[in-house]
Image: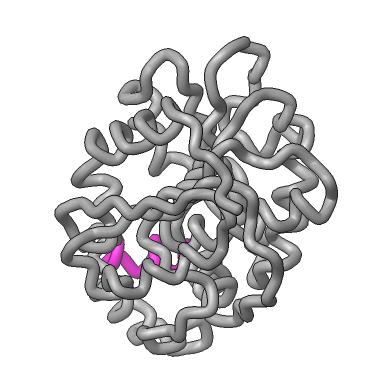
Amino acid sequence: MDGKWLTDHDLRQEGGHRLFCLPYAGGSAAVYHRWRTAAPGSLRVCPVELPGRGRRLGEPPISRLRPLVNALADGLEGALDRPYALFGHSMGGLLAFELTRTLRERDLPLPDHLFVSGAAGPGTPRRRPVVHDATDEELRRELRFLNGTPRELLENDELMALMLPTLRADFSVLETYEYRPGPPLPVPVTVLGGTADPSVPLASLHGWRERTSATCRLRTFPGDHFFLHSAMADVMAAVRAALGRPAPVTP
């Protein structure tokens, strides 16, 4: 396993599930660090660090989904020797889905469960403007709309100059993605959405039902696009409940 993908890559502990957590656009592994103390003892939270942020800030970010997912599959392959699940928010939800498809193509162990949070079903038309090649101000305007970037960061030109290449690459991953039809995944899916999310309305979440031959459950939480922070305890409870009961595959 390539340890640079995980902030804590000592995975020798036995038992329970590993929960590999993929960040949203512009986010790093740090967005999931609080989850470690909130998770029950049977769940080992493993935040994933993508290139261009956190400890990997010096690496160039990857701006297309396919090479990013292939690199993820290469990096995590050695950590799939225990029961595990994938959790991804927004861009991370799309990455988790396509990573699972890639693992199936490679005949590698699949997750016991897939959690997609704040992410429209693959193939759903985009509702937001394309910003990966927009001006800096237009990109900041989109970040203000999403309401997940602290105002002090948005107003700090030096910090924004540091983060803009990664933000542009992440938005490019989302905005250049084209869903490729394929057989549904034999993995149960829990879809999580914010009741006041302005960019991913609840109606856009129903498309996930077509992407699995197993069960697909929708859970909603009060909050906007970044409800995973404001409703962290409830989100973690939903994860714990989903992993605590098997979900049969439907014919």
For the N terminus, give its image quadrant: top right
Residue at x 74%, y 56% (from the top left corner): 102
Q: Is residue 89 visible?
A: yes
Residue at x 32%, y 71% (from the top left corner): 200
Is 163 covered by the magenta stretch?
A: yes
Residue at x 53%, y 79% (from the top left corner): 123
Residue at x 49%, y 57% (from the top left corner): 93
Left or right of residue 172: residue 229: left
Q: Is residue 58 visible?
A: no
| Camera-nearest residue between 184 and 7 | 184
- Find residue 94 and report its image quarter: bottom right
What's the magenta region?
153-164
| Camera-nearest residue between 140 and 247 | 247
Is 137 covered by the magenta stretch?
A: no
| Camera-nearest residue between 131 and 86 | 86
Magenta stretch, main secondary structure, is: helix
Left or right of residue 181: residue 192: left
- Find residue 240 and report its image quarter: top left
In this picture the colour scheme is: one colour
Residue 36 horizontal/vertical position (percent): 40, 25
Residue extending farthest top: 14
Residue 46 horizontal/vertical position (percent): 53, 31
Residue 59 horizontal/vertical position (percent): 67, 54
Image vertical order of residue 128 relative to residue 15, above or below: below
